[in-house]
Amino acid sequence: MKIPEKLETRRLILRPYIDIDFKSFSLLLKDQSVSKNQYLVPERQTSKGDQSLFSSIIKSYNSTEPLFALAICTKDNEGFIGTCGLKFLEINGLTECFYALLPEYRRNGFAIESMLKLLDFSFEELKIPKIVIYMHPNNTRAWKVAERIGMKYLGHIKHKNIVPKAMFFSIEKREYDTQHQY
């Protein structure tokens, strides 16, 4: 799997993590709205656990199986505002996307902008045929983002990390291409 060096949108840069991102990354993990509503970002009690996770992400970039996690940064000052990426699910062969923003950057369209770029890269460069996302039903912002980027809601399903049942969304390359023709 190819981790991009940099993906750019009109206002954002998506790039691999670098050491100076740690403080903001740790703040994101400690944000209660993220830990409560997104099972992909487990709640951590100590910065030592955050440092271990952060270090493992950075070290993975040079491995044969890198973790596909990117920092979302603003173009104006290149400051970290969130994270996005892909998770390859071995059980059913699907590829799941994820995203989370620091509270002060929500409701500005940054999640939609970053996810559209991630989907474009996933379909065009990585040749992934279908991308899914599971989310907690209480995370209304996340499911609105999923809908705005063209994902289809396919119902509530059992998921080992989400109680009650997770909301399940997906989008296939052909659907994305139809929705985003220029």
Image (cartoon, rainbow, N blue to C red):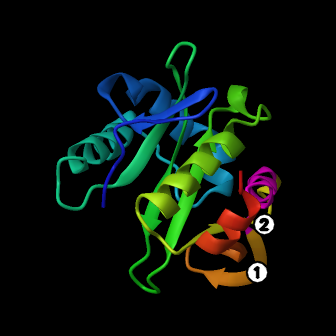
Magenta range: 141-151
| Residue 127 locus on image (x, y percent) | 44, 68
Q: Is residue 106 visible?
A: yes
| Residue 105 locus on image (x, y percent) | 69, 28
| Image quadrant in which you'd find residue 159 | bottom right
Vertical placement of residue 6 versus 123, above or below: above
| Residue 6 locus on image (x, y percent) | 40, 36
C-beta proximity under 8 Å, tags 2 and 1 = yes
Q: Is residue 103 left or right of residue 159?
A: right
Q: Residue at x 76, y 56 (%)?
A: 139
Question: If you read the primary sequence from the N terminus, does the residue marked by circle 2 or circle 1 appear first?
Answer: 2
Q: Residue at x 55, y 79 (%)?
A: 160
How far apart marks 2 and 1 lie (CA) works out to 8 Å
Q: Is residue 65 left or right of residue 4?
A: left
Q: Amino acid at mark 1?
A: His
Q: Amino acid at mark 2?
A: Pro
Determine which residue is flagged by label 1: 156
User: Element at badge 2?
Assistant: loop
Vertical placement of residue 148 versus 114, above or below: below
- Return the residue nearer the eye: 34 or 111: 111
Determine which residue is flagged by label 2: 137
Q: Residue at x 47, y 70 (%)?
A: 128
Q: Residue at x 24, y 50 (%)?
A: 60
Q: Is residue 20 left or right of residue 179?
A: left
Residue 11 is tagged as none
* Quarter in which the N terminus is drawn: bottom left
